[in-house]
Amino acid sequence: LILLKASTAQVATCRDDADANTDWFFVYKPPNSENSKIIKSAAVIAWTPSARAINLAAGHSISTTMANFIADNMNIKVLAYSDDPPNLPPQNGKSKAKGVLLVDNRVDDAAA
């Protein structure tokens, strides 16, 4: 799963596993595992284990970043993608591409 942030909006803000703001992050989850690794904007950029398993909502960077979107905020526009076709079995069990891009669409937002 890949999430990128190109906005300084308070609503659509990337959050890491400690619920701190971060400019961007990538999360890698291997097949057949619930453990993931995260790489994020920092002074030293390196892959580190995520604080929680990806299936546990609280305390994972994906769930903390998506919290405002899940709350049905009308100022957030979302683009989500998946390489699996809808309503069909996965076509390739070895390669997965999924992601979400959140953008705050208010006029005073840098990304609007």
Image (cartoon, grey):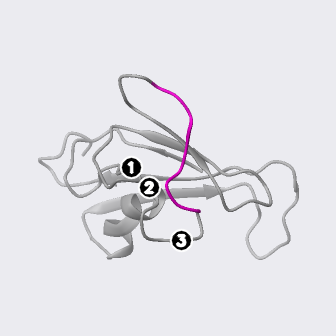
Residue at (35%, 68%) from the top-left corner? 67
Identify the residue position indicated by label 2 in the image. 61
Residue 17 relative to residue 29: left or right:
left
Distance between the alpha carbons at the discs numbered 2 and 1: 4 Å
Relative to 11, residue 87 above or below: below
Residue 71 at x, y = what percent? 32, 76
Q: Are marks 2 and 1 in contact (CB under 8 Å)?
A: yes
Q: Residues within 10 Å of mark 3 (few under 14, many from 20)?
A: few
Q: Earlier in the sequence, mark 2 or mark 1?
A: 1
Horizontally, residue 23 falls left or right of residue 4, namely: left
Q: Nearer the viewer, residue 5 or 108?
A: 5
Residue visible at 17% across and 46% down in the picture: 109
Of callouts 3 and 2, the N-terminal one = 3
Q: Nearer the viewer, residue 9 or 60?
A: 60
Magenta region: which residues? 45-53
* Residue type at tag 3: Leu
Across and down, in percent, residue 30 comes to 74, 50
The amino acid at mark 2 is: Ser
In the rendered structure, the answer to whether residue 109 lies left or right of residue 89 reads left
Q: Residues within 10 Å of mark 2 (few under 14, many from 20)?
A: many
Q: SS class of the residue under badge 2?
A: helix
Image quadrant in which you'd find residue 93:
bottom right
Residue 79 location (% of width, % of height): 48, 56
Is there a contact, CB below 8 Å, between mark 1 and mark 3? no
Give the amino acid type for the residue marked by disc 1 in the picture.
Answer: Asp
Which residue is under mark 3?
Answer: 56
Q: Is residue 85 left or right of 49 when viewed as pictured?
A: right
Residue extending furthest toward the top = 44
How much space separates mark 3 and mark 2, taking CA atoms? 11 Å
Residue sitting at x 38%, y 49%:
16
- The label shown at residue 16 is 1
